[in-house]
Image: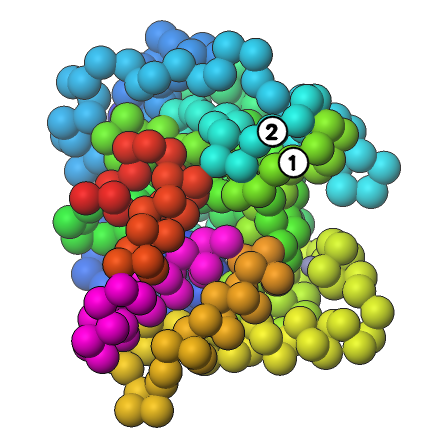
Amino acid sequence: MLILKHVGLILRIRALSRPITVMAKHLKPRTFCITPVRPEMQVSSSWTTCTISKKIVRWEIWKQPPPPAAPANPPYVLEQSSDKGIKMVARRPIAMGELIALERPLVVSRTDVAIAEDQSTTGIFYRAALSGLSPAARNTIKSLRNSFGPEQEPILGTLLTNYQPVTIPDADTEYSGLFPTLCRANHACSPNANFFFNSRSFTGQFHAVRAIATGEEITALYCELAASRQERRAELQEHYKFLCECPTCSLPADLVAQSDSRRRAIGKLIPMMHAGAYADDLTVARIEELLGWATDEGLYALYAEILVYGFGLATKLGASNQARKWSQLAATAFKVLDGADSPRLN
Ligand SMILES: [Zn+2]
């Protein structure tokens, strides 16, 4: 067990796939503890094998029964693509809302995962962390993409490239996890799968947000989608070092302009949605328009958020039938995004 105290760090925070770099001067020095949770387990097991935070080790989840099994015959295969490394591909038709994949993370740490200014220190820290993993788990991590190249210590670069949010209700900070299969899905600006972390079973899950045909690539989001193509490409280039050429980014110029203006309009609504605030001139008709655009743009998670926001607006305006309709549609959307035991259905 290695204990390392970090003072004066540069931290990279990846919250809901939006990486931000901040100086650590706002944060107190912390002690990290690297602990194998199930060191005897192999990568094929469903148990997390390692955490990089003392606090996570104490979570009650480790006393719970193993999580539900992943689909016995997964509806996907991992294939080598000609241009994007490994990709996840549907090997049969997948229905909207279907569970595509489910797994425990191999590694969990605080999202503000430490990056020492001295890269050699960072390297020692993370190599020690991974030495507690099984050889199969270590090899899996080594095989994953590291978008950062020489600017980052290799293991940390791999973690930062592939981390997904691990959302714990009432947690005092944010956590991230490495899901070795889910992280193989490539990005698309109108993704057909939604990543959801189920804190009850401590599993990362992909659910199909629309019907997916045999042979179609299964995609997730790596950046803010309620933004223009230029903004999305800039974010992806900065944090993942690739130029997005997904179907949405490859549309003809006039359709890109239309897509950009719709996504920007939805993006403008997001701060209001998070604040639960309603502009005086916001109408039910405008929400209907934005819901239509979110659907046309393939932004299913945002569609669900707008439904909840619209429910609040309709309630405020006394439009009870409209509120009931949007509430029911939101419940259906959450089941699609998160599965039947979505905490957002409560
Ligand atoms: Zn794109």
Mark 2 sits on what residue? 94
Magenta residues, start to end: 300-323
The x and y percentages for residue 44 are 48, 12
Amino acid beneath label 1: Ile
Q: Is residue 301 magenta?
A: yes
The x and y percentages for residue 212 are 65, 36
Q: Is residue 15 above or below residue 216?
A: below
Q: Secondary structure at mark 2?
A: loop
Q: Is residue 32 above or below residue 320?
A: above
Q: Ligand 1: which quarter?
A: bottom right
Q: Name the image quarter holding residue 198.
A: top left
In front of the other: 300 or 82 = 300
Regarding residue 32, the answer to whether it shows in the image is no
Cα separation between marks 1 and 2: 5 Å
Q: Is residue 294 magenta?
A: no
Mark 1 sits on what residue? 212
Amino acid beneath label 2: Ile
